Amino acid sequence: EAQVTQNPRYLITVTGKKLTVTCSQNMNHEYMSWYRQDPGLGLRQIYYSMNVEVTDKGDVPEGYKVSRKEKRNFPLILESPSPNQTSLYFCASSSPDRERGKLFFGSGTQLSVL
Amino acid sequence: KNEVEQSPQNLTAQEGEFITINCSYSVGISALHWLQQHPGGGIVSLFMLSSGKKKHGRLIATINIQEKHSSLHITASHPRDSAVYICAAKWWNGGSQGNLIFGKGTKLSVKP
C-alpha cells in the first residue's frame, strides 16, 4: 500500500532533549517536506527536499534540521527543543510526474515540549 | 511577502447545497493545491492545479492565473464533506519549486 509513515504519533519531551521524528515513503517520490500546524496559524512549511542530498528551508526552519541521505527517508531533527516547538507536525511526499502531482501526507506527530 | 488568503473562514450549508470556497494569492505561482483535513486530523490532497479546471466526482477546482485566484466547488454537498479545506500555493524559490505557502483554511459544516 502506498503510504507515508511518520513516527511517533505522539511525543512528550522536555526542553533541550534532542529528538528525531521519522518520515518514510514507499512511492519513490522525489519531493518530501515537513510542516507544522498551529491553531490560528494554519500549516507552515519547515523544510523540503527536491531529491536525495537536496534540501531547502521553508518558512519556519529555525530550530529544526533535516537530512535526505536516501530517497525514502526524510527525518526531522530538533537538536534542542523548546516549548514554542509544541505543535502538530506533518510529513508529505509527491512526484511532479505521477499521481497528478498530489501530495501524500503522513498521519501527523503531536509533539509537546515541556 | 507571499500570502494566500482563503474565504470564507467558516461555512455552514444544508445537505444538497452547492458550495464554493475561494483562494487568492499575492504573487505568481507554479501550481496550487487543494487539501482536505477531517476532524481526526488526517490531510488528503484533492487537486493540484497549474491552469484551467479539474473535476473529481462532486468536487471541481478552477484556477485563474491572471487574476491570481482559485475556487473549490462542491456539488450536492453531503454531511461527510464536513472538513477543513486548505489551499496551498507553490512558489518559485530561487529556481526551486518546493516552497509551499498555505491559506488558513475554510471550516465547512454540512447539516443533514
Image (spheres, rainbow, N blue to C red):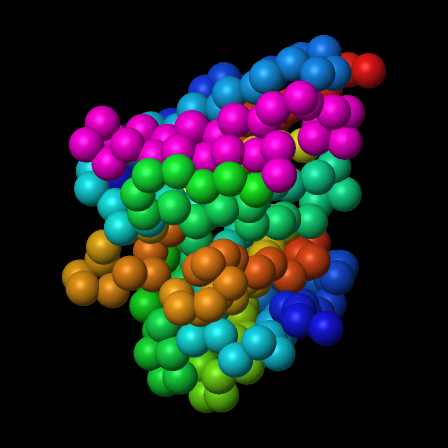
Using the rendered image of the protein, determine whether residue B7 is visible from the camera's viewpoint: yes
Using the rendered image of the protein, determine whether residue A41 is visible from the camera's viewpoint: no
* Residue at image coords 25%, 45%: B29
Left/right of residue A5 with respect to residue B103 in the rendered view? right
Q: Position of residue B105 (x, y in %)?
A: 52, 31
Q: Is residue B89 magenta?
A: no
Q: Is residue B70 magenta?
A: yes
Q: Position of residue A56 (x, y in %)?
A: 32, 68
Q: Quadrant of residue B40?
A: top right
Q: Magenta span covers which residues? A: B57-82
Q: Quadrant of residue B58?
A: top right
Closest to the observer, A56 or B52: B52
* Residue at image coords 36%, 84%: A53
* Residue at image coords 27%, 50%: B30
**Position of the N terminus of chain B by quadrant:** top left
Q: Is residue A13 above or below residue A42?
A: below
Q: Is residue A73 above or below residue B91?
A: below
Left/right of residue B17 with respect to residue A70 in the rendered view? right
